[in-house]
Amino acid sequence: MILAPSVRQVLRRLRRRCCESVGVARYSRPALNGLDRKLERVLDMDGGTFVEAGANDGYEQSNTYYLEKFRGWSGLLVEPVPQLAAECRKNRSAVVLEAALTEQDIPGATAEIHLAGLMSTVTGALGDETATDRHVRKALEVQGLRAAAPLRVPARSLSQLIDEAGIRLPIDLLSLDVEGAEVSALRGLDLKRHAPRYICVEARDRERIAAVLEERYRQVEILSDSGSHQDILFALR
């Protein structure tokens, strides 16, 4: 179940905005495992362009929040859950589009999302039904969330969304965290038209992801390793 922001969350947002209004970034680096700091070391520039898929509310664990607020970056946030996309629009100035990522563009296509907060996943992304159920149960327990019925959402390719967002500048960073659906999402990216300089992927199967990218990209660094998955940075060759 997606709940309205709590009083504590609202107060935290106000505190963060007050600090940001005077140039203080104390509460503006929300990425997990310091990924925003690690990415900034590589992409130490102002005015870049990003695409972040699996955006959640645009703040919690976002890899691009700091870049937008303090380095003048702009771009696209992709979040399939309507309530979270609405929060993205409150937290960010980037374009926000609502869709699950898929390999092919099929008019009217949809995907089933299993709601689990920051760990929501698409049916089939993690394997069979048993793997999905196990993932969702663990995610709800860890985050203290209640179970909710799966949600049917539009399914679209990354390149289609980039076109709709009107992004004309070269993409400096693609941040991809879609709970097991990364390979399908990357196959929906037309690298002849949209080839980000860097791609940061939360990878559960590094070899399959590397196989999709190997002709155009090289692995730069493993930014974090939790055991069950890695955050891997790839750079355009």
Image: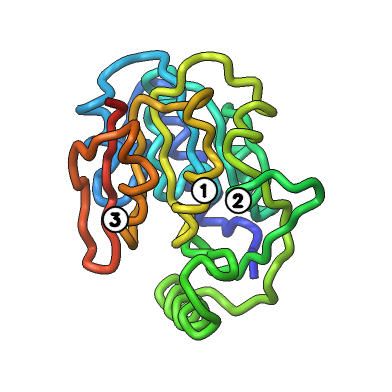
| Residue in the image at 59% along x and 69% along y | 123
Tell which of 198 and 147 is nearer to you: 198
Mark 2: which amino acid? Thr
Q: Secondary structure at mark 3?
A: helix
Q: Which is more N-terminal, label 3 or label 2?
A: 2
Number of other residues with Cα within 10 Å of mark 3, as a class: few under 14, some 14 to 19, many 20 or more: some
Cβ atoms under marks 3 and 1 closer than 8 Å: no
| Residue in the image at 52% along x and 37% along y | 189
Mark 1: which amino acid? Ala
Q: Position of residue 222 (x, y in %)?
A: 19, 47
Q: Position of residue 165 (x, y in %)?
A: 65, 27
Number of other residues with Cα within 10 Å of mark 2, as a class: few under 14, some 14 to 19, many 20 or more: many
Q: Circle 3 is placed at which residue position?
A: 206
Q: Circle 1 is placed at which residue position?
A: 185
| Residue in the image at 28% along x and 31% along y | 235
Cβ atoms under marks 1 and 2 closer than 8 Å: yes
**In the rendered image of this protein, does residue 104 appear above or below residue 92?**
below
Q: Circle 2 is placed at which residue position?
A: 102
Mark 3: which amino acid? Arg
Task: Tell me the distance, in whole angstroms, between the alpha carbons under discs 2 and 3.
Answer: 19 Å
| Residue in the image at 57% along x and 39% along y | 158
Q: Which is more N-terminal, label 1 or label 3?
A: 1
Q: Secondary structure at mark 1?
A: helix
Task: Tell me the distance, in whole angstroms, between the alpha carbons under discs 1 and 2.
Answer: 5 Å
Q: Secondary structure at mark 2?
A: loop
Task: Tell me the distance, in whole angstroms, between the alpha carbons under discs 3 and 1.
Answer: 14 Å
Q: Which is more N-terminal, label 2 or label 1?
A: 2
